[in-house]
Amino acid sequence: MSNSILTAEMIRVSGTAATRDDAIREAGTVLVEAGAVSPAYVEAMFEREASVSTYMGNFLAIPHGTNEAKDSILRSGLSVVRYDEPIDWDGNEVRFVVGIAGLNNEHLEILSKIAIIFSEEDEVAGLLAAGSADEVFALLEAVNE
């Protein structure tokens, strides 16, 4: 088990979800499989989404759990799921769902790194064009620094 927040194994270049809720579940499941969170964290991601949309612009949504769910975080981690077809996220088009779990408020630092990458249209275009999880990882691995 690596201590990296993001590994290529935590990236899906062809997500299977077709709805917002399924996309949240898909991103959450990757975090569970990576050993970053317990399944209870995924439920907290839905609670967070019910109170505030995690759509960020530039085809990006960053679902994450509520503050009350921090006990279900085992280590900081990211999941990245890319969709070939845009997902309707409260009326916005989303192609990237980035699940975040941060220990000890590390999620704020991780969020800012992701937001910076996705604020650059060239970066987003590169992520959309990437042919594999390894290529996506190469574009995002700065989050591990």
Image: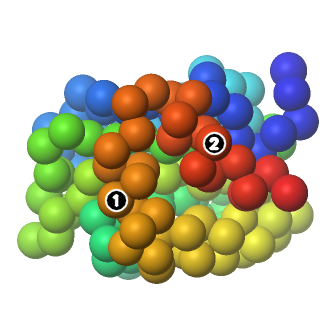
Residue 69 in view in this figure: yes
Q: Residue at x 13, y 43 (%)?
A: 85
Q: Which residue is mark 2?
A: 138
What's under tag 2, amino acid-wise? Ala
Relative image position of residue 37 (x, y in whole percent)? 69, 37
Find numbered disc 2 in the image and state the secondary structure of the residue it sits on: helix
Task: Identify whether 85 is placed above or below 131.
Answer: below
Q: Which residue is mark 1?
A: 125
The quadrant of the rendering that contains the N terminus is: top right
Question: Quarter-wise, where is residue 52 in the image?
Answer: bottom left
The quadrant of the rendering that contains the C terminus is: bottom right
Q: Residue at x 26, y 41 (%)?
A: 83
Relative image position of residue 101 (x, y in whole percent)? 67, 52
Q: CA distance from mark 1 to mark 2?
A: 14 Å
**How many C-alpha atoms fall within 10 Å of the one at disc 1: few (<14), some, or many (≥20)?**
few
Q: Residue at x 45, y 27 (%)?
A: 132
**How many C-alpha atoms fall within 10 Å of the one at disc 2: few (<14), some, or many (≥20)?**
some
Relative image position of residue 26 (x, y in whole percent)? 39, 34
Relative image position of residue 140 (x, y in whole percent)? 62, 51
Q: Nearer the viewer, residue 40 or 84?
A: 84
What's under tag 1, amino acid-wise? Ala
Identify the mark at residue 43; answer none if there is no mark: none
Question: From the viewer's perspective, is 78 left or right of 76?
Answer: left
